[in-house]
Amino acid sequence: MNPAIIRGATLLVLSELIFSLLAALVKHLSEDYSNAQVVFLRNFVALLVLLPYLKWRGRLHFRINRIGFHLLRSTTGISSMYLYFFCLGVLPLGETTLLIQTSPIWIPVIAYFWLKEEFKKSYLFAGLFGLLGVALVVRPTPSDFSPVVLLALLGAMLGAGSRVTIRKMASTETSNSIVLYFSLISSVITAVPAVLDWHPIARSDWPLLLALGLTAAAGQLLMTKAFMLAPSGRIGFWSYTQVVFAFLLGFLFWQETVHPMSIAGAICIVIAGLISTGYVSLWIQRLRHKSG
């Protein structure tokens, strides 16, 4: 196998592990601090990490072409983050991560209505698999159902909207400017709610709060590097390893058990994600090519 693909896949798995640790930190800190405070510190510390890094790499540029799309991307991304972090404080870590990972299923729908992109038949199958997976995970019965899962799904949809906005910006903006301005705008917008709902920070928690931003920046940079080394079609499915890491961390630190239906739902959601992002059709084409 191509060494670049192996390295890219390794970096992507490492980034997903870091994002899982970020989610675990959020869940732990949500017990003592407000959602607004945690969201702000995650973005602000990430900004403090990104600024010197981009300066060191010679990529610190503030000139942009479409401020409106930067604002749209930031507001949808921040809204998704608020919902995600809130759900982490209420729902099991693994199930919250799994519901947020339904985001790729919603991307083709948003892209169809907004960007007028083609809606393939495979997207319909992806949607059906995704909805089945969600139903298995949330177990919508009076005894098991929590309305908070609807917020997690809304967060996934907003996250999908944020990603589609990035696609819209790709022709005029650089990846560095998109990452930088997201952290900058997010820090400004989330500062006010954080101040209004600020809780004194214990000295022992400062390292954990600082780790929020460090893990966010490190995960983002590693993920970006991974997709620079290898095509997304060859390594992108490794993003779902975050679900595995989240379930393991939930079991280790919060003794969260994994319901058999959640495992079945996870399989359906992963299949849906692979279909919607084109990996299944790519694999089928390769098999046909080899057999031919």
Image (cartoon, rainbow, N blue to C red):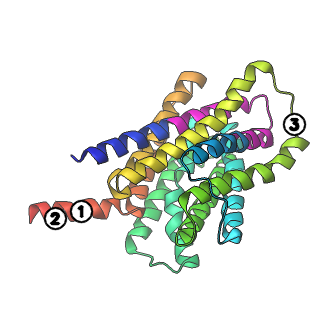
At x 63%, y 58%, the residue is 61
Q: Report the Cα–Cα distance between label 3 and label 1.
A: 53 Å
Q: In which quarter of the image is the C terminus?
A: bottom left
Q: Give the range drawn in magenta.
A: 18-42
152 or 159, which is in the foreground? Answer: 159
Vertically, is 70 above or below 241?
below
Of the image marks 3 and 2, the number of the one nearer the N terminus? 3
Q: Which amino acid does label 1 sit on?
A: Ile
Q: Which mark is residue 198?
A: 3
Residues packed near mark 2 inside 10 Å, few (<14), some (14 to 19) or many (20 plus): few
Q: Describe the element under mark 1 as helix, strand or loop.
A: helix
Q: Give residue 92's position: percent from left, percent from top.
A: 60, 35
In terms of image quadrants, where is residue 21?
top right
Residue where numbered disc 1 is placed: 284
Closer mark to the observer between disc 3 and disc 2: 3
- Residue 123 is one of the magenta-drawn residues: no
Vertically, is 23 above or below 229?
above
The answer to whether the residue labelled 3 contacts the one labelled 2, judged by CB atoms less than 8 Å apart, is no
At x 43%, y 56%, the residue is 273
Prevailing secondary structure of the magenta residues: helix
Q: Give residue 113's position: percent from left, percent from top.
A: 57, 78
The answer to whether the residue labelled 2 contacts the one labelled 1, judged by CB atoms less than 8 Å apart, is yes
Residue where numbered disc 2 is placed: 288
Q: Judge left or right: residue 50 versus residue 244.
A: right
At x 66%, y 72%, the residue is 66
At x 75%, y 29%, the residue is 31
Q: Judge left or right: residue 265 versus residue 201.
A: left
95 or 172, which is in the foreground? Answer: 172
